[in-house]
Structure formats: structure tokens, C-alpha cells
Amino acid sequence: MKGRWGVFVCLKVMLCFMCVSAYASSFECLIEPSKTVVLSSPTTGLLDRVSVTRGDRVKKGQVLATLDSQVEQSAVNAARFKSEQLGPMRLAENKILFLTRKFERQRNLAVDKLVSIQDRDNAESELRLAEAELLVAKENRQIAKLELLQQLSLLSLRSMRSPFDGVVVEQLAFPGEMVEPGVSKKSVLKIAQLNPVKVHVILPKKLFGKIKIGKDVEVFPEINNKVSYIAEIKTVDKLIDAGSGTFVVYLEIKNAQFSIPTGVKCNAIFNDI
């Protein structure tokens, strides 16, 4: 009796496996970084410092490398000093206080006809000129603040920051080398975004229209095919390659711990197709 029951259980398991296999398909795929960026300098200069090396994890906005910036820093210091100057404004303000009192005295004396109208008008003119001087001093200080912002912007061009959280893939330049902007010029670092990772799958055209964005797919990396990850379908090509009769689907896997290997082949299990 026990033997018959064991055979029955085995047959049931086999039937279930056959049912699952009938509604699931496996396709080869490739796990890649979601983004890869070659970091170049936005301006020409001598590379002064690279604060990271290959394999280092970096944060978005982190300064990764800097150019020599002594000239730019001096310009910033001068612009900051000018923007913080209060002497011209204080001088104009004190001059206004003095000339205001003078004008009030001249106006009162003119009412009593103790001074001429011309003297009163001269005192008022001096006061208005002092008020204009104060306005000019305020405008000059505002211009100095704008010049400081400009110099700070120029100084910031001497630093290269990470555009996202990721990992340094390769160091392409070292301190002491000249770097320039442009794709064909000397670049500094290559950075990859590994959270999330992207899975590149090529599917036959018979499945076109059956793959839905947002569905889950089970992915097995070839390095450790006993471990699987759940990926989400993010992009489905709208065109079929006529030569191969295939189209491309991109999946996405969360990788907060950077534990998923990239640059490796994998198998993607699509259900219900």
C-alpha cells in the first residue's frame, strides 16, 4: 500500500512540473549596469587629485576628482571680499544723516528768512546726491555678490562629481596629467550604476505582443544558478529586427546591497507565455 502511494505522489509531482513547464519559458539574458558613464572634465586643466580608485562605491554628488584651481580660488576670495565690503554703504549712510540734519536746519532758517532760498536748495541737492551715492553703493555690492556666484561657478567646474550612486569601474587618468572636455579627449573615471541593474533579454518574434510591462520575471545568474532574483519588465521594443526575427526586452532588478553580479549571462524565466 505504501509503495502504491509513493508512486502516486511521484506521478503527481511530475504532472505538476509538466504543467508549470508548459506555461513557462526560459531565455538567455545578460545582466548589465543600468548606466555607465565616462566622467570627463568640463574644462581643460591639470588633474590635481583623484579621491577614488577602481572598485570604490560612490554617492551622487560626491567629488571624485579635482583640477588644479589656485587661480580660480584666488578669484573667489577676491570676489567674496568685495561682496562683503560695508565701507561704501556706511560712508553713504553717515553722509545722508549729516546732510539730512543740515537740510532741515537750512529749511527752517529759510522759513524765518534767515538764509536764502538758494542755500536751502543747495542743502537739499547735497542730500539727494548722498542718497544717490548710497544707492550706487548698494548696487555695487549686489554686483559683487553676482560676481562671487560667477567665480564660484567657475571654481565648481574644476571638480568632477558623481552623477549617481554607483561603483568606479576604471580610472583613466592620474594626478599630473592634462585633461580636456570632449569624448575624444582624456577622460578621468568610468562609473557604473548598479542599483538597479538591467537585464537584457532577446526574445523571438512569436512572443511579440505577449510581454507586458510591469510583470515579474525570475532571473538566474550563471555564476550561481541556484540563486534567483525577481526582475520587473521595464521596456519592450516596439520594433522587430528583420534579420534575426527577434526583439529586445529590458528587465530591472533592485540591487541595494550591490550583491547581484553584472556583466554575466543569465537565464530569465517568463511565466504564462
Image (cartoon, rainbow, N blue to C red):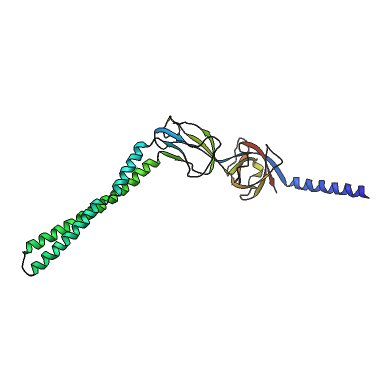
Considering depth in this image, is 223 or 46 the residue closer to the camera? 46
Q: Residue furthest right?
A: 1
66 relative position to 222: left or right: left
Residue 103 x, y percent position in the rendering: 14, 63
Residue 83 in view, yes or no: yes
Residue at (31%, 49%) from the top-left corner?
145
* Residue found at x 36% / y 44%: 152
Q: Is residue 188 left or right of residue 233?
A: left
Report the number of discs. Answer: 0
Q: Residue furthest bottom?
A: 112
Is 140 left, or right, of 272 in this rendering? left
Pick the residue in front: 113 or 17. 113
Q: Is residue 273 visible?
A: no
Residue 174 position, x and y percent, is 47, 31
Question: Residue at coordinates 10% horizontally, 63% vertically from top-left?
Answer: 120
Q: Residue furthest top?
A: 177
Left or right, residue 66 beside residue 250:
left
Q: Percent x, y for residue 81?
A: 30, 46
**Which one is nearer the viewer's eye here, 93 or 206?**
93
- Residue 80 point in image, percent of width and height: 32, 46
